[in-house]
Amino acid sequence: MRTSRLSLSDAAIREAAEALVRGRLVAFPTETVYGLGARADRAEAVLRIFAAKGRPSGNPLIVHVADREAARALASEWPDAAEALGRAFWPGPLTLVVRREPRSIVDEACAGGATVGVRVPAHPVALELLRIAGVPVAAPSANRSTTISPTTAEHVLKTLEGRVDVVLDAGPTGFGIESTIVDVTRVPMRLLRHGAIPLADIARFGEVVDATAGASSPEVRAEAPGMHAKHYAPRAKVILVEAAEVAAEVAARQAAGQRTGAIERAPGTVVEGLREGLAAEPEGYARELYAALHRLDDAGCDAIVIAQVPDDGGWAAVRDRLRRASADESL
Ligand code: TXA
Ligand code: MG
């Protein structure tokens, strides 16, 4: 398969929408990361996503739609919490898990489960694409399974060139980490993945249990099958240390002959070579993190030493991604 890369224009969005309708695979920007889209109401289209990503078929996909009404049409039950959260955060980086209306999308999109994760993305290009296509679009992050999520079209092509029909290039994404996932099929609601919207913002709309705390427990693995640790990992070994220990850790590894990169919170610092200085606050840090990991991986690092970030609510999603990137299973 030849991948066609389209620069952003109205014609390009139309061409991408037509490809989606024909059952093709289209990588497109969202406000979080690039998604690998296919229409969610056609089994053969959805199965191509799993094949292109090398994703286990038991891991359900998030379905993207253009507005709240379209989201509701995928659900067999629409709890008050879904209505309230949808009104508050959509379009935006929030995925709601609801009971699904079985005829709206194919079983393959939901890994045969009784629920569907649905979201209305805030990126204007994604919204326009969804409006023109007029079909629900299943879209995981546009990367091979277990590799770093893509925040640019180049990142998509790194692992999916020749495996995706169209890449719609609209430059870097805004949030840089994935959507927050909340299961609203139960009371209290359950946070299944930390993401671009902090837990505290969700909690304003009702009691919410943080189900990610034991993220590698069998129970959570069954709830959100993609939530196990072997995700978001670069090829290099990632070592998380306290900020004060970064220099010593880098020096020790270099002395041992390892090509070693580092990621620190160092805003305004002139950073050279294999050192990446990211923002001091969580939003800016999140926006830059995956691109920094991609760069250090591309530079052939054997090891990447990352300074741990603060242990407070605003940093929860970033801490989660750092923990996954450094998980032993990913090596
Ligand atoms: O920001 C995002 O959410 C991006 C963009 C492209 O929208 N998408 C994304 O998709 O991160 P993906 O496939 O990489 O992650 C989706 C996660 C998986 O861990 C999956 O297990 C979980 O959502 N998920 C999807 N449907 C679910 C469901 N019905 N119940 C529980 N978890 C679900
Ligand atoms: Mg992903």
Image (spheres, rainbow, N blue to C red):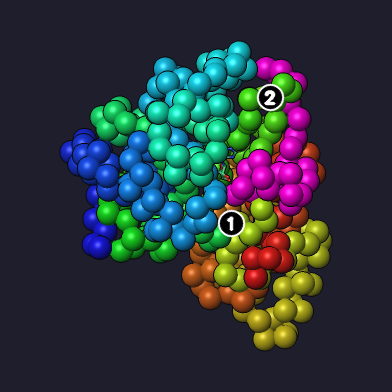
Amino acid identity at mark 1: Tyr
Nearer to us of marks 2 and 1 is: 2
Question: Where does label 1 land, which residue?
Answer: 232
Horizontally, is 116 left or right of 311 in the view?
Answer: left
Horizontally, is 295 left or right of 263 in the view?
Answer: left
* Category of crowding for the residue at label 1, using alpha-carbon neighbours closer than 10 angstroms: few (below 14), some (14–19), many (at least 20): many
Mark-to-mark CA distance, 2 and 1 = 28 Å
Q: Could one spot residue 169 in this view of the protein? A: no
Question: Where does label 2 land, which residue?
Answer: 186
Task: Say which element carries label 1.
Answer: loop
Answer yes or no: disc 1 within 8 Å of ligand 2: yes
Amino acid identity at mark 2: Arg
161 vs 135, nearest the viewer: 135
Mark 2 vs 1: CB contact within 8 A: no
Name the quadrant of the N terminus.
Answer: bottom left
Q: Quadrant of residue 30?
A: top left
What stretch of residues is rendered in magenta?
203-227
Residue 295, label in figure? none
Horizontally, is 12 left or right of 269 in the view?
Answer: left
Q: Is residue 181 magenta?
A: no
Horizontal and vertical percent for residue 81? 62, 17
Residue beneath the point at 30% across and 63% down: 162
Q: Could one spot residue 178 in this view of the protein? A: yes
Horizontal and vertical percent for residue 141? 47, 48
Q: Is residue 204 magenta?
A: yes
Horizontal and vertical percent for residue 274? 58, 69
